[in-house]
Amino acid sequence: MDDSILIRTQKLIDELKSTCANYGLGNDGNEYKVITQVFLYKYLNDKFMKYATEHHLDAGMSRYDGIMAMEGDEFEELENILPAHIAIFKKEQLIPSLHNRQNEPGFDKLFDDTLTEVAAQNANIFSVRTAEHTSILMFEPLSVFITDASKRADFCRAIINKLSQFSFEDAFEQGYDFYSSIYEYLIQDYNTDSGGKYAEYFTPHSVGRVMAQILVDGKPKSVTCYDPSAGSGTLLMCLADRIGQDKCTIFSQDISQKSSGLLRLNLILNGLAASLQNVVQGNTLTEPGFSEKTGGLKKFDFIVSNPPFKLDFSEYRDQLDSKERKSVYFAGVPKVPNKKKESMAIYLCFLQHVIASLSDKGKAAIVVPSGFLTASSSLEKSIREKLVKQKWLRGVVSMPSNIFAATGTSVSVIFIDKDGASKREGAILIDASQLGTKEKDNNNKQYTRLSREEEERIITTFEKREAVDSFAVVPSYDEMEEKGYSFSAGQYFDVKIEHVDITPEEFKQKMAAFMAEFNELSAQSAKLDEEIRNQMSFLEFTQPEN
């Protein structure tokens, strides 16, 4: 990866955030829209100019001058010859054109109109849709977020000047490591747990890499990949990088409009714009975005998911617990508690949705709270029983605590594999809870970071299906049934008692020391009892005054 372009791109992001702060948008709820949209506008602008002039550029001529020199028919033909993942621009919509016109009156309107026009003319490729099939365009007017109307034109000029001083050309040939780093840097302040009940937790790349590496063995030729709780797309991007962007079609759904917008940016940066038509914003459980022509949920080759764990979904709980949806929610739907409705285990619905959405040879990895591994309630146990009885459970990895900075909940990853299930006799259970290094994120929250070597240890152990003392065990499905379908590695580890040889004299000395400590503690306890009794003897009832 080219560190120089990485540093320059991060500098552009910092400068854009600084501009927003200077005009009152620092820590504002709309700042992420400005930053992500102008960043994407710049990226698509530079990509269009590069491809448009690839074979039409005279020596010494800039790409912009080359485009401006094109005759009308030649320029209009670009729309037919450029690849579908290249957004189409008109000459006046290019950033250099706006830069040249920045001193015109009403520049804020010109800036906003340009963005909305670019979005409209590229709607067929670059829109995402809601569950009700409404298109959400790529850009929206941005100057309106500046409350002081007299400063809007200056704000737009400042943005255009920042964009004009930077070029993405050196970045286009960079790979996934570059774009994943840039994307994480770009949204690090916007993808946090501050989003209320639909908190959009950022899945660490280490977890995503472990899930993708274990899920994908071999080299698939053409597969479908799905995430029913996609968030900003970290898991899908790790999976696509593992498979190859040209060999997979991405499908996703998330209830958050913010997350869907961030996912769109992630797909475009990672060369997956062709899958934008499969991004759905809506409630996956009540309005699943993908179905088969013959009815029922669409089936996928690979599924990854880090769903919300706890959430009040009492408003539509009965809608899920219906006869029509029994094929999906085979184990049932969590009941509405009398108190703490926000503690409803919605992840159990997503887990069942994932199982129902897998093809006959499909593979899935889903993040769950570690409590699921041993929970004794009928719902959790029924799901575990089905995975064991059908021989779909390939394995479980229990992650270190605080692997997610946003939550202290211990998490595990369940790996489901329907391919070759009949030949499988057991599952591998890995306890990686002791791995990792404690660090703090930009918000001073502690989290645990897995090193690449630790990731590789988990992956290699899983793939070899080998037992390792206090780390991994490979129980048969029959053993798991005997253990009440427990998925916890610790319950299958051999209990080892270490015997230390000591002499009779050493034994007497140790016992004497223990007895002395016991006598001292007993004396302290007796003294404390006496003090409490004395204090209680002074207590008396006092009649309150009227």
Image (tube, rainbow, N blue to C red):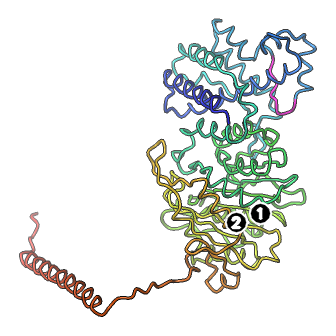
Query: Sequence-wise, which precedes: disc 1 or disc 2?
Result: 1
State the residue lying farthest toward the bottom.
504
Position of 374 relative to 108 (above/below): below
Kindly report the distance in space between the C-alpha atoms of the residues bearing marks 1 and 2: 7 Å
| Residue at point 76%, 40% (across, down) | 134
- Which residue does the numbered mark 1 point to in the structure image? 363
The span shown in magenta is: 83-90
SS of the residue under disc 2: strand
**In x, y percent, where is residue 240?**
76, 48
- Give the SS element for disc 1: strand
Q: Position of residue 504 (x, y in %)?
A: 30, 93
Identify the residue shown where x is 58% and y is 33%. 32
Query: Residue 57 at x, y = what percent?
Result: 85, 14
**Left or right, residue 508 beside residue 55:** left
User: Does 87 sit left or right of 24 as displayed?
Assistant: right
For residue 132, above or below residue 436:
above
Give, as a three-letter code, the residue at label 2.
Phe
**Between residues 300 and 257, which one lies in front from this camera angle?**
300
| Quadrant the C terminus occupies | bottom left
Which quadrant of the rendered structure holds the N terminus?
top right
Q: Most prominent secondary structure in the magenta stretch?
A: loop
Task: Determine which residue is flagged by label 2.
Answer: 415
How many marks the image carries: the answer is: 2
Q: Is residue 105 left or right of residue 119?
A: left
Residue 404 counted in the magenta span: no
In the rendered structure, which amino acid carries the disc numbered 1?
Lys
- CB of mark 1 within 8 Å of CB of mark 2? yes
Q: Quadrant for residue 133, please give it.
A: top right
